[in-house]
């Protein structure tokens, strides 16, 4: 299956990070140069303060050098990662031999699994997979180390690290119209209500009026718990107090973090799986279970049930016994009860002097009773 359309974010994520870093470096240098220029102008106007100004300039230049060095190291690392990703995809496109293509597809599956594990919050597993030689320079999962701490805190019902994370990334979250900060502040009010501290909850709402300015409905919903005797039992508010609320907060936080780092859209593994199942699914799937059909597998059946049946201009007959295609060299054979199997499948069942047992009806027939089937 051609999965080239699923490779976008693999290169886009490090490339976007490289562009953001270059922009941040430019702003840093411009701001520091502006301060230095102001200090030099002050030196012209007040020659008597030369020693103090020069000392201040030395400190500013030392700070600029330190920050610029850090930004440059990050830029080199991101450029190396972007180049490694591009070269990896280029190698896959240029692979010609079946062995090279098979090896590259195996590595691509590993990449899809890494993406899936990161989206599920299994960062340690994703890092272990990304450490293999073929992918060691393509990922920088250290960016999720901070997120691990925040998620662990939410798992312990602690909102502090999550609120701090939102403060750190406030500008970028606002550009993406994220509601993460609003959701966390609402939950902070709910926890005060749970403790019976209604006045503290009102004070918190007033202190964060700027956060709720564009989201008055969320604020009204949270404030509604103040006038209820038992809000945790009311259908409108009980989701705030349910233990699953913390899992929802973790999921929302993870999706926001992934978006900030360019991991947008649906998971490639999920898309590839659904496309593959849709291509293999036929009218018989669901009515009958074929052990050789991926769409009929127990673990995938619920996914395939929601997908449309594949549109095929030409049908291909596959033997349910051997899983092999039936053609002129392995023709379809029909038993008297109407069930069709391949010639190889019937020969494999012929173990008792020409007698075969139909796997579906358990009826016994002689091999000579099977007739070759011709399909026009």
Image (cartoon, rainbow, N blue to C red):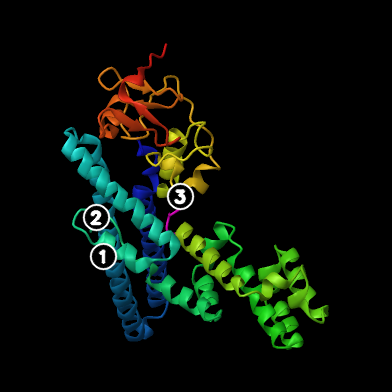
- Per the model, the C-alpha gap separating discs 1 and 2 is 20 Å
Describe the element under mark 1 as helix, strand or loop: helix
Is residue 99 visible in this depiction of the protein?
A: yes
The x, y position of residue 38, in whole percent, is 42, 71
Nearer to the camera, 294 or 27: 294
The residue to which callout 2 is attached is 135
The residue to which callout 1 is attached is 73
Residue that extends furthest to the top in the rendered view of this protein: 376
The residue to which callout 3 is attached is 298
Question: In screen coordinates, is 206 left or right of 79?
Answer: right
Relative to residue 133, is residue 73 depicted above or below? below
Q: Earlier in the sequence, mark 3 or mark 1?
A: 1
Q: Is residue 264 magenta?
A: yes
Question: In screen coordinates, is 321 left or right of 311?
Answer: left
The x, y position of residue 309, in whole percent, is 52, 32
Relative to residue 24, is residue 90 depicted above or below? above
Describe the element under mark 3 as helix, strand or loop: loop
Mark 1 crowd level (few <14, some 14–19, many ≥20, 10 Å Cα): few
Q: Earlier in the sequence, mark 1 or mark 2?
A: 1
Q: Which residues are magenta?
A: 261-265
């Amino acid at each position: 299956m051609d999965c080239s359309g699923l490779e976008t974010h693999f290169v886009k994520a490090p490339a976007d990070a490289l562009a953001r870093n270059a922009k941040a470096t430019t702003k840093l240098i411009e701001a520091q140069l502006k301060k230095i220029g102001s200090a030099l102008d002050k030196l012209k106007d007040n020659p008597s303060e030369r020693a103090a100004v020069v000392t201040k300039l030395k400190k500013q230049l030392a700070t600029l050098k330190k920050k610029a060095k850090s930004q440059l190291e990050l830029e080199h690392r991101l450029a190396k990662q972007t180049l490694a990703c591009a070269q990896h995809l280029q190698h896959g496109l240029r692979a010609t031999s079946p062995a090279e293509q098979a090896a590259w597809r195996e590595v691509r599956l590993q990449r899809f699994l890494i993406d899936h594990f990161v989206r599920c919050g299994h960062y340690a597993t994703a890092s272990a997979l990304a450490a293999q030689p073929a992918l060691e320079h393509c990922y920088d999962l250290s960016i999720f180390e901070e997120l691990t701490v925040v998620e662990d805190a939410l798992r312990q019902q602690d909102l502090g690290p999550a609120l701090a994370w939102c403060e750190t990334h406030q500008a970028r979250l606002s550009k993406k119209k994220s509601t993460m900060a609003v959701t966390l502040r609402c939950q902070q009010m709910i926890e005060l209500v749970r403790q019976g501290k209604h006045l503290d909850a009102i004070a918190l709402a007033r202190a964060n009026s700027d956060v709720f300015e564009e989201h008055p409905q969320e604020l009204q919903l949270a404030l509604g718990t103040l006038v209820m005797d038992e809000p945790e039992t009311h259908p409108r508010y009980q989701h705030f107090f349910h233990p699953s609320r913390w899992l929802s907060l973790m999921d929302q936080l993870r999706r926001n973090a992934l978006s900030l780092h360019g991991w947008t859209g649906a998971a490639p593994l999920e898309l590839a799986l659904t496309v593959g199942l849709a291509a293999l699914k036929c009218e018989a799937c669901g009515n009958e279970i074929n052990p050789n059909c991926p769409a009929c597998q127990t673990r995938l059946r619920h996914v395939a049930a929601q997908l449309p049946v594949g549109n095929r201009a030409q049908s291909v007959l596959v033997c349910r016994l051997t899983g092999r295609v039936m053609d002129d060299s392995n023709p379809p054979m029909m038993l008297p009860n109407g069930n069709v199997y391949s010639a190889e499948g019937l020969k494999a069942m012929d173990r008792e002097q020409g007698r075969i047992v139909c796997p579906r009806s358990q009826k016994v027939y002689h091999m000579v009773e099977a007739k070759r089937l011709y399909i026009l």
